[in-house]
Image (cartoon, helix red, strand yellow):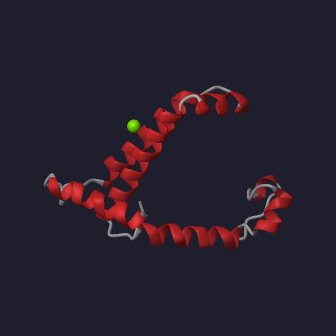
Amino acid sequence: MEIKEAQDKIKGFDIARGWRNDWNIKDLLLNITEEGGELWDLIKWVNDEKQKEVINNNKEKVSDYIGDTLFLLLKIANQTKVDASQALQNTLEEYERRMPAEKMKQVKHANTKAGGIDNK
Ligand SMILES: [Mg+2]
């Protein structure tokens, strides 16, 4: 499913339930935080190797997290009249500019405080 199609489907989902004008960005953001907390709960307090193992053993929960979070993000996009596909394109273009692939292969990360580069 394309992002635009998903955004339109979610708009239809809300309209079908009479939720067109019922929205609260703060609540949606809290809900996104809750979703992150559900995923974090799986891997909290474990090292990187154990995280990989837990994630690999809980793909359904990871998929639920991604689906639920995308749903909420696209609801925010609808309610704020943002084209999510264009927003993602803009972000990718900005990251390409800030973190050129050849330079990033050398420094590994963008965090300038840790010796990386970030062409902000
Ligand atoms: Mg969930």
Left or right of residue 115, residue 43 in this image: left
Q: Which percent across, then down, holds residue 60?
A: 48, 34
30 with respect to 103 (left or right): left
Residue 103 locus on image (x, y percent): 82, 66
Residue at the farthest left position: 18
Q: Is residue 93 visible?
A: yes
Q: Quadrant of the N terminus?
A: bottom left
Looking at this view, name the residue that lies furthest to the front: 1
Q: Vertically, is 73 above or below 88?
A: above
Q: Is residue 120 in view?
A: no
Number of numbered labels in the structure image: 0
Pick the front one: 102 or 112: 102
Q: Quadrant of residue 104 in the image?
A: bottom right
Nearest the camera: 3 or 88? 3
Judge whether 25 appears above or below 100 on screen: above
Give coordinates of residue 81: x percent, y percent. Answer: 32, 70
Q: In this view, does 22 lie above or below 44?
A: below
Give the image quadrant in which the ligand numbered 1 is located: top left
Where does the C terminus fall, quadrant-wise? Answer: bottom right
Viewer-nearest residue: 61 or 25: 61
- Point 84% across, 58% down: residue: 107
Q: Who's the residue at 15% across and 55% down the image?
A: 16
Residue at point 75%, 69% (across, down)? 100
57 horizontally vs 104: left or right: left
* Residue beneath the point at 42% across and 52% down: 70
